[in-house]
Amino acid sequence: MPPWAAALALLLAALALLLLRPWKRAVGARTPVRDHEEQEVVSGGPADQFSDRCEPLPGGCSLICKPSALAQCLLRTLRRSAALEPSPRSWLSGPHLQTFCHFILPVGPGPELAREYLQLADDGLVALDWVIGPCARGRRVTNPGSLPPVLLVIPNAWGRLTRNVLGLCLLALERGYYPVIFHRRGHHGCPLVSPRLQPFGDPSDLKEAVTYIRFRHPAAPLFAVSEGSGSALLLSYLGECGSSSYVTGAACISPVLRCREWFEAGLPWPYERGFLLQQKIALSRYASALEDTVDTSKLFRSSSLREFEETLFCHTKSFPISWDTYWDLNDPLRDVDEAAVPVLCICSADDPVCGPPACTLPAELFHSNPYFFLLLSSQGGHCGFLRPEPLPAWSHEVILESFRALTEFFRMEERMKGLSRRRTSFLGGRRRWGGLQKREVSPSSNLEEVFNWKRSYTR
């Protein structure tokens, strides 16, 4: 047995022993909220504040959203989804096992990736991993008669590429998408060429990456999926860009929505230590490069995620800011009212990382904003939602089915608008043919001066 396998087996054994006793500390559990969470998980239903405008779904799930034609379309799709059908209870049902299997188990044989490094305006680098294979069961056509859509996948904020992310990419490739994984500066082998990292909710690098993707695929629909803490980046981007985001639809798996409270309350200690260790390992190779900007000795002595985040982005040597100012600039919901893209958030009532929905999910967002939809499951852990092998996580199936429903809904809306315009034109008299022939300008026509192949190279 190789050394890494032995170490992994010991780690899994230790974690299994930890599962024998309950963890008393959870996000938002400074009061008797923990008791409320336990009652909620046992009952298998959402919290009281989510009972309003709550539509039941198969498998003990619920859809919470503002009533609209789009909501009815999505509701019909989810009620017909085979992925939500209840399955026999298995050893994977526990929330901690769902989470540990997702984050700790080896990735295994993943997809074939073609990496591109994109040079940014400040000379920094981000990486784009295009999934090009394999596709064992044959590639399906998602939208007959149209270009294959691009699926932009944003991993968690710690930079770890998990089993579920790669599984989603393989399933999307099979369904006819072009998946591409976005990696931040210094994450997953992307070199840190400048002493600047991407703050938790700063979408500036993602904006340039999306612009480049649109340059490469100007006419293809663009969908986006984020995982866990990476959802802060996607939601910040959708809020800042509004109707100019180029995104047709988005989904967030186990999103962290109240991020400041999440950092301040802390996580159950195994997750807190694990995520903290992951960040320290990722940045240790750049310790000498970061010495001029942050106190690296204090950074690597951090004992909590909040202390690590605050030291890295607030207590800088060149431009220190307060913790309050940092979240004024990085709260993912700061511009949420400007978002103009349907967003499906898939969350679990037994999420051990995010905490109980009553404390961590803003119910008013889903009750008042017609673009946000909450699919709340009674179980699934954090980013887990696993099913027995070889079935993929049911969250992946639901996301791709919802994207297809969005595509059909928007196509029908455009068709109805076209009929309405033709009826108005017929009733208003004949028009000049030349006035109706509007030439569509490709989004890439004005970007050739911004991006060229010298600024993006393939490994």
Image (cartoon, helix red, strand yellow):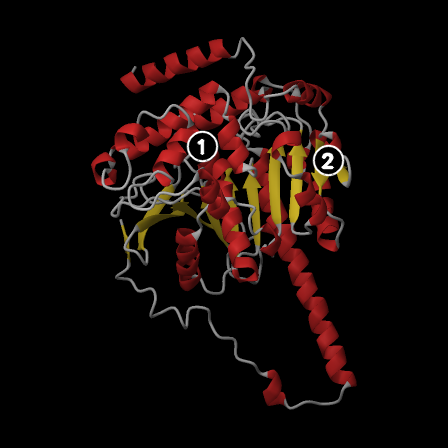
Q: Nearer the viewer, residue 266 or 457?
A: 266
Q: Would you name the residue on which mark 1 appears? A: 163
Q: Is residue 174 visible?
A: no
Q: Quadrant location of the N terminus? A: top left
**At x 53% / y 8%, what residue is drawn?**
20
Give the residue type that dot 2 points to: Phe
Q: Position of residue 179 (x, y in %)?
A: 45, 48
Label 2: element kind:
helix
Q: In the figure, 382 relative to 183: above or below?
A: above
From what the image shows, is residue 222 above or below residue 192? below
Residue 270 versus residue 455: which sits nearer the camera? 270
Total marks drawn? 2
35 to 366, vertically: above or below: above
Residue 104 location (% of width, % of height): 42, 24
* Crowd rating for badge 1 (residues with CA inside 10 Å; few <14, some 14–19, many 20+): some
Residue drawn where x is 68% and y is 50% of the image: 369
Local SS, label 1 = helix
| Quadrant in the rendering for residue 133 | top left
Toward the left, the furthest residue is 288
Q: Which residue is mark 2?
A: 50
Task: List x then y, in percent, for residue 395.
Answer: 58, 36
